[in-house]
Every structure is written in C-alpha cells, then in structure tokens.
Amino acid sequence: MHDESARSVAVTKHAVVIAGGGPTGLMLAGELALARVDVAIVERRANQDLAGSRAGGLHSRTIEVLDQRGIADRFLSQGKVMQVGGFATIPLDISDFPTRHNYGLALFQDRIERILAAWVSELAVPIYRECEVTGFAQDDTGVDVELGCGRSLRATYLVGCDGGRSLIRKKAGIDFPGWDPSTSYLIAEVEMTGEPQWGIRRDDKGIHGLGKLEDAKRVRVVSSEQHVKQGDEPTVDELREALIAVYGTDYGVHNVTFLSRFTDTTRQAASYRERRVLLAGDAAHVHSPAGGQGLNIGVQDAVNLGWKLAQVVNGLSPESLLDTYHAERHPIGACVLKTTMAQTALNRGDERTNALRETMSELMKMDEPRKRYAARMSGLDIRYDLGTGHPLLGRRMPDLDVVTESGPRRVFTLLHDARPVLLNLGEPGALDIAPWADRVERVDARYAGAWELPVLGVVAAPAAVLIRPDGHAAWAGGGTDHGLRDALTTWFGPPTAP
Ligand SMILES: Cc1cc2nc3c(=O)[nH]c(=O)nc-3n(C[C@H](O)[C@H](O)[C@H](O)COP(=O)(O)OP(=O)(O)OC[C@H]3O[C@@H](n4cnc5c(N)ncnc54)[C@H](O)[C@@H]3O)c2cc1C
C-alpha cells in the first residue's frame, strides 16, 4: 500500500471516545480524565462559540457537583448568584435550603462551556475539533468509530453526547419515544429602535419575553408562535410577524444576529446503553427549556456515568455496573420530561390556564409544596433507589464541615479527585476496608453538627458514610460494618486478595 493511503486509514486507539463536546461531553471527559482513563472528544465545532445564548444558568445541585471537583468558583466568579428556580415562572426560593449553594447561577451556556473546556484542557484530554463522527460499528471488544475528517478511532466504549439529534443514538438503533411538539417558539438576539415592553407577557397563544442581553443594548426575544412550526431557520419576516401579533409593533427590530426556533418536543431514549455505546445529555432526553433543566441534567448524567465507566475500563468493576447508569438516570430524565410538560401546559395564557396557574402559585407559596418543588427543580431532591436503610442512602452527601486528622475540611473537598471515600465519624480506624484500600480512601473525622437534608429536614447522624465519586451515599452505617462489604463490592468491585 502507498504510504499516503496507509496514513489515511491509521487507527488511533482510546479507551473511551465521546461524540460531542457540549456541556455533557466536556463534563464526562473531565470525570474520566480524573480517573486516568484515556479519553478523547470528537467535536464538530471549531471552539465553544454558540449561535445564540441557549442555557441561562446552573441550578444548585449542578453547582454542588462542580464544587465536588473543586471548580465551582470558576463559574461563580463569572456569573450572577440569584434565586433562579421556578415552576412555570412561579418563583421558587431556596435560600433556606441546607446547602452551601442555596441559590442558582445566571451564566450563559457559552461561558459555561468555555470554563468546562479549559478544565478539560488542563486535564490534557485530546479534542478532535472540526470533525464529525459519521458512523460506528461495535463488536465484542470495542467500537470502530468513523470520523468525517479522514481519521478512524478504535475505542473500548463510545458515548454519544452529541445532542438531541444524536447520530450515535440513531445508529445504535435506540428508540426515542415521546411526544411531538405542541408549541413552537422563536428565539432571537436583536436590536430594537423603540423601547420594548420588558419582561414576560402571556396571551392565549402562550408566553413571550423580551429581556436585555449582557451589553444592556441588545434584546433577547423569546416568543411563542401562533401556529406550531418546525425547522431551525425561521426568517426575520416571521420574527416581525410574531412581534406584531403579540405587541402590535415589531419595535423596529434590526441587526438580527441570531434567530432560531425551538419547540417542546419531549422524548427520551428507551435505553441509555446499547452494549458498548452509551448516551448522555440531550442525546438521551429532549424537552422544553421551561425551568432550565437540560444542561443541568446533562452535566449530572455525566457525573453519574463517569466514575462507573472509569471503573469498568480500569478493570475494577464488571460491565454490569454500567446498567446502574440507566437504572439511576432514566427515572431522573423521565421526571424532568414530566415537569417540563406540566410547565408547558401551565404557560398557556387562556383564562382557564391563568386560573390554574394562580391556584398553583398559591400552593407553591406554602412551605411543604415550595420545598418539594424547589428541591426538584434545583436537583437537590435526587435519590437513587439503593434499597431501604438510612434516609441518606442514595441521596447526595451534604457538604459538612468535618474535622479530620489533618484539620478542618469540607466533605466536598474529599471528592476533588473523583474517588470514593469512606467517611468514618465513629471510633478512628474502626472500619477495616483493607481489601479496597487501592480504590477507596478512608477518612476518619469528627462532626458534631446536625444532619439536615433538603425536603426531609433533620435526620439521625450516621456513624459512617460510603460516598460514591458522584457524591451520593452508597452506604450509611449505624455503628457496625453491617452491609459495608456488600456495598463496597457492588459499587467499587470485588476485594483485592491479600
Ligand atoms: C432556547 C434554549 C434555552 C435553554 N435554556 C436552558 C437553561 O436555562 N438551563 C438548562 O439547563 N438548559 C437549557 N437549555 C438546554 C441546553 O441548551 C441543552 O440541554 C444542553 O446544551 C445539552 O448539552 P449536551 O452537551 O447534552 O448537548 P449539546 O449542547 O447539543 O452538545 C452536543 C455537541 O455535540 C456536537 N455534535 C453533534 N453531532 C456530532 C457529531 N456527529 N460528531 C461530533 N460532534 C457532534 C455539537 O456540535 C455539540 O457541541 C436551553 C435550550 C434552548 C434551546
């Protein structure tokens, strides 16, 4: 074979290839790199620039998972901390919630992506940019990944983080059941000659909003259309018509730098795994942006999957660990689909829906419903079904201020390396985890304060907690090691022989 053609079919190997370097793919790459997995991203775009602003911020639990990796400050320093939570625009305040981050963060998606990309670059993850995954074939030992830029990759696992129209999902033959759109919106970034009516407005067609962009000069328009339309490329005339239909004027709209359409199409992948191929983020679920959930649950999918995939790739855990990714995250996605559909219905502006929204608004002002829905929208209520036991089991470990042998520490700082931790708050040295000592760090510590969880309130103090790298409690002990060996084996693989 001629040298040139031999080079063009050269195959580069990686343990994991991620299709798509949006928020989900970048977060997943960071998680895998922390676990020393050879991971690469293939991304169609040349950089993290986005046409339009898309997601407007982060919810509390997403800030917490970033804090668990020691990178939350990078985001907090660029955004605006505020109460961002709401349900169909009914505000939900979480300032009394038991979390260090009892707020959300207003920060546009391109900024979020740039920060994540910088982190991933520090972790030396290669990104094949301006390059598309065009197909793949999986066999018993790996996946051949075809790229459109004259390269071929071979991976042990391929993860589709390639957005709502995911090629990976389609080529893997994974069903995407759900609901066609019931409404469509135009979204635009423009200048206006006249002073518009700022804020949200409802009519019988739905919800419309005009807000100032960061430079305070340009306007972000979101307007629901008179009839459901599809297609990403609406015209400026359609935008003018939509404005006139709602406001009676187009406010002299000009200099339209971004114009797109989105809908409330609601679908979820039937399975998040097809043998060596996995899905995360929008590739696994799409829904209306109501409530600002998509980016947030994509990042959290990545944090659930990352350590599990790393353990399987590193030969510590059997492949069946990957099935817990679907088992845990599919119900979370299904719940988000349901709450976005409920919000879409409540956002209609006819008199009956207005009456229903006012009723809901009264309910949401009551403490119990507010806490329940605010926890849901902020991601603080997530509980993976790990069986019965202490209320902490399957829930997020709170970021307690503990005192360790080396001094005061926040629990989240123990998770910076994305490794599991056995936090022993009882007799120092009491719990023997020697057969897992290569994978699980035991930290002896003292903590005298209350254990307060979102929604549940104060719970009994456990004597020890086995914390997974994603921050969820895999085991909570009451003073003995009952069940600890099983939990260690289930989540972190069989014991190492002495
Ligand atoms: C108007 C609007 C407002 C929103 N507001 C919010 C909000 O406030 N909060 C929130 O949490 N979410 C919000 N979202 C949703 C959020 O934007 C998405 O959920 C989020 O971008 C999903 O991230 P992702 O990484 O899974 O997918 P994407 O961001 O779609 O990233 C996929 C990446 O894969 C790349 N790609 C695709 N195909 C290929 C291929 N074959 N090969 C290589 N690369 C490929 C793409 O270039 C892209 O970079 C909003 C969305 C819209 C439209």
Image (cartoon, rainbow, N blue to C red):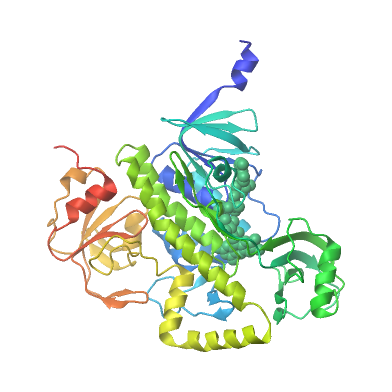
Report the residue at 58% width, 50% height from top. 22
Is the residue 434 above or below the residue 265 in the image?
Answer: above
Q: Nearer the viewer, residue 412 or 377?
A: 377
Whole-percent x and y of residue 32? Answer: 42, 44
* Relative side of 65 to 259, left or right: left
Q: Is residue 426 left or right of residue 1?
A: left
What's the residue at 55%, 59% (across, down)?
Answer: 295
Q: Ligand 1 quadrant?
A: bottom right
- The quadrant of the rendering that contains the C terminus is top left
273, above or below 364, in the image? above
Q: Is residue 108 visible to us here?
A: no
Seen from the viewer's position, the closer of residues 159 and 170 is 170
244 over 263 or under it: above or below: below
Measuring from the top left, give residue 286's x and y in whole percent: 57, 58
User: Looking at the figure, which quarter contains the N terminus?
Assistant: top right
- Near-viewer residue (361 or 250): 361
Left or right of 53? Residue 466 is left
Identify the image quadrant of residue 55. bottom right
Instruction: Kindly indicate the quadrant of the structure image that contains residue 5.
Output: top right
Q: In which quadrant of the rendered view does residue 95 lie?
A: bottom left
Q: Is residue 212 left or right of residue 113?
A: right
